Image: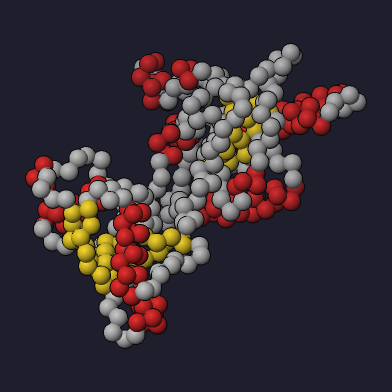
Amino acid sequence: MLFLDPESFLYYRKDIFRNDYFVFEPFADEEAKAEFFQANQIHLYKIRKLLVLEDFSWNFKGEADLYRRRPFPRKFLQPEASDYPCYVFQSELSKAFNHKGDIETIVDLIEYRYALVAQVGAQAKFQIRFKESLVTSTKEFIKNILRKVYERYKVKLMPARKNNLILKADGYREYFEGNYQLLQYERVRTCLRKNEPMKLILTEIPKAYRDRRFPPLFKSKVDVPPVDQDGSGIADPGPFNFNILKGSSPYFWYPPVPNVRTLYDRMEKAQKSKLINASTNSSTQVRASFIRKVVYLAPDKELVSLTEHRHRTGGTTVPKSS
């Protein structure tokens, strides 16, 4: 996963299942670097603005700094609340509804009134009512609605070029997204319990409403960065392709160790001297490998919080950092 340190503004990649190393990812393209720097500064400004409180200041030292440099929690990769929430059950339908094989449905077509009026005239009704099987999938359900509309009005309803058709529960912020069977949707089960028809609205949502480039997860060809003969870490996978993040953002997260800018500069200085020595007989690929820098970390068991350290020692001393 690609991260951005909010302090040093250095990019680094890290295996989310391991905490024993991370890899710095420098930009090779200066123009792209400036573009990403500007975009991420705006994101970071919005985040920092949330921390501005009147007559209050923050102190991220000691245990607070250890906490924000903790291993990245994988639960943070769960998607946030959708703009088009969908509520489904994975459990089976109650046996009380074994006798029910379909549900009465009323579909509102008001969003397509202009197309209907243009074809049929003012007498067009903006609703269709029919029974649908509870085991019908969402996509097939929408197709059945379009067939009913065409049979009645001879109109082919089509979404805008960059949109998809979707069903919304009338009066609720609830959408029939995905391709589940109807009996799995909460709105369907609610209507069955109340013994009332299900009222829906045929509408549209953008095809690309989700940012599929965030979080910036990607697969690497090798799991562990190999170590070369002289013991310095050199990452085998190629440099990160920052172009796939255009319009999106890396994940803002503090690296496991502080003062990474100093660490990065020291590593860069050491590797530049290697690059000069190897420049006479090295290929472009070998040169690029010297630019990427791997930082190896102590095992997790050596990292303890300030509170845990005080519990162990019974005092108020601060643990030495390895």
In which quadrant of the rendered view does residue 201 lie? bottom left
In the picture provided, is 60 more to the left or to the right than 75?
Answer: right
Can you see residue 170? no
Q: From the viewer's side, name the closer residue of 205 and 298.
A: 205
* Quadrant holding the N terminus: top right
Q: Residue at x 72, y 33 (%)?
A: 265
Report how many numbered discs are placed on residues in the image: 0
Q: Position of residue 124 (x, y in %)?
A: 30, 81
Which scheme is used to colour this image of the protein? secondary structure
User: Where the C terminus falls, by quadrant?
Assistant: top right
What residue is shown at x 46% (from left), y 48% (from top)? Answer: 57
Residue pictured at 74% horizontal, 28% vertical: 289
Image-quadrant location for residue 159: bottom left
Residue 31 seen in this snapshot: yes
Residue at horizontal 31 percent and vertical 60 percent from the top: 144
**Percent coordinates x, y for residue 8 in the rendering:** 62, 40
Residue 155 sits above or below residue 58 on the image: below
Looking at the picture, tell me which residue is in the foreground, 194 or 44: 194
Relative horizontal placement of residue 305, taking residue 97 as reference (left or right): right
Q: Could you tell whether 232 is left or right of 49 in the image?
A: right
Residue 206 vs residue 182, the one in the foreground: 182
Determine the residue located farthest toward the bottom in the rendered image. Answer: 122
x, y percent for residue 137: 31, 50
Q: Nearer the viewer, residue 58 or 243?
A: 243
Question: In the rendering, at what x and y percent does residue 294 appear?
Answer: 65, 26
User: Which residue ends up furthest to the right in the rendered image?
Assistant: 280
